[in-house]
Amino acid sequence: MSKQRITALGLALGFTLSSAFAAPGKAPTNPATDNEAHIEQAMHNPKARAAGKRAAFLCVYCHGEDGSSVQENIPNLAGQNPVYLLTQIQKFGDGRRNDEFMSGLIKALKEEDRVNMAVYYSTMQPKTPASSDAALVEKGRKRYLATCIGCHGPKAIGSHSTARLAGQRVSYITEALANYRSSKSPRTDPVMTTVARNLAPDDIPAVAAFLSTLK
Ligand code: HEC
Ligand code: HEC
């Protein structure tokens, strides 16, 4: 085929494809509102939760039965905000967040499985142990009320964009804050990196201890 013919074919194909996919009058999509809409839809689908539980067999080894982690440095997924969960799964999938185990596994999941799993885990209750160091918990409570409450909420149940922290593992909260602080970690966030860098080193174990006591 001549060079000209190839160019002509390419143009024709490009034209047909772009006209087939351009939906006239449709506003450009926004990933954050798309995630909210997909979760909202799945919450009303009576089959989504069971489908999410089936797909989650891949996750049990690390995130525990029903999303309550039984290993250090691995987060509970139980009770987490479903839109936050879906967003984090997408971040592992596209490299905005990295973990040697999670990243490969997540890339293999279809969008529908991701949505169903987020719905399934959000309906569970976290069951990890709470800190019993009363003085440390009290110090952490004061720090939480002064610095974190505005975004993570009075009961630390988070929001679509900020994460539930209530009932989360002490070791995971500690590591997540260390990761935000470090310039070497793949996990950065413009807001949390600033917050974490402004904490005194001994605020971190205190706030983690306090959060582990919330249900
Ligand atoms: C081999 C262990 C392992 C397996 C299996 C695993 N994860 Fe993870 N997961 C982790 C670790 C470790 C982290 C924390 C990584 C970090 O801090 O960046 C994590 C973090 C997450 C987070 C972020 C939670 C948060 O609070 O930000 C989500 C969501 C998640 N995993 C979902 C899943 C799903 C869904 C599956 C099953 C398809 C799965 N994981 C399987 C180890 C695992
Ligand atoms: C101005 C809003 C804001 C404030 C204040 C804030 N956070 Fe966050 N936090 C966020 C956002 C947004 C995220 C999600 C970032 C991401 O996607 O990585 C987050 C995520 C986190 C995570 C990761 C949770 C997980 O499951 O991986 C931890 C831990 C955390 N925050 C702890 C804290 C603590 C402790 C404080 C107070 C010292 C605090 N945050 C104050 C907005 C805030």
Image: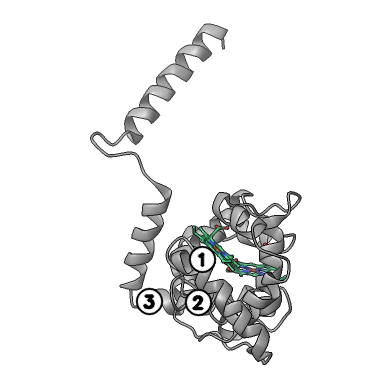
Q: Which residue is mark 2?
A: 121
Whether disc 3's CB lies below 8 Å from ligand 1 is answered no
Q: Position of residue 34 (x, y in %)?
A: 38, 53
* Quadrant containing ligand 2: bottom right
Whether disc 2's CB lies below 8 Å from ligand 1 is answered yes
Query: Is residue 164 among the parts visible in the rendering?
Result: no
Whether disc 1's CB lies below 8 Å from ligand 1 is answered yes
| Quadrant of the image occupied by residue 29 | top left
Amino acid tagged 1 = Leu
State the residue in front, 147 or 172.
147
Q: Position of residue 164 (x, y in %)?
A: 50, 72
Work out whether 125 lies above or below 40: below
- Which residue corresponds to the image point at 62% horizontal and 80% vertical from the top-left? 139
Q: Which residue is mark 1?
A: 85
- Mark 1 near mark 2, Cβ–Cβ under 8 Å? yes
Determine the CA span between mark 1 and mark 2: 9 Å
The answer to whether residue 21 is left or right of residue 98 is: left
Disc 3 secondary structure class: loop
Q: What crowding class fits label 1: few (fewer than 14 Cα within 10 Å), some (14-19), or many (20 or more)? A: many
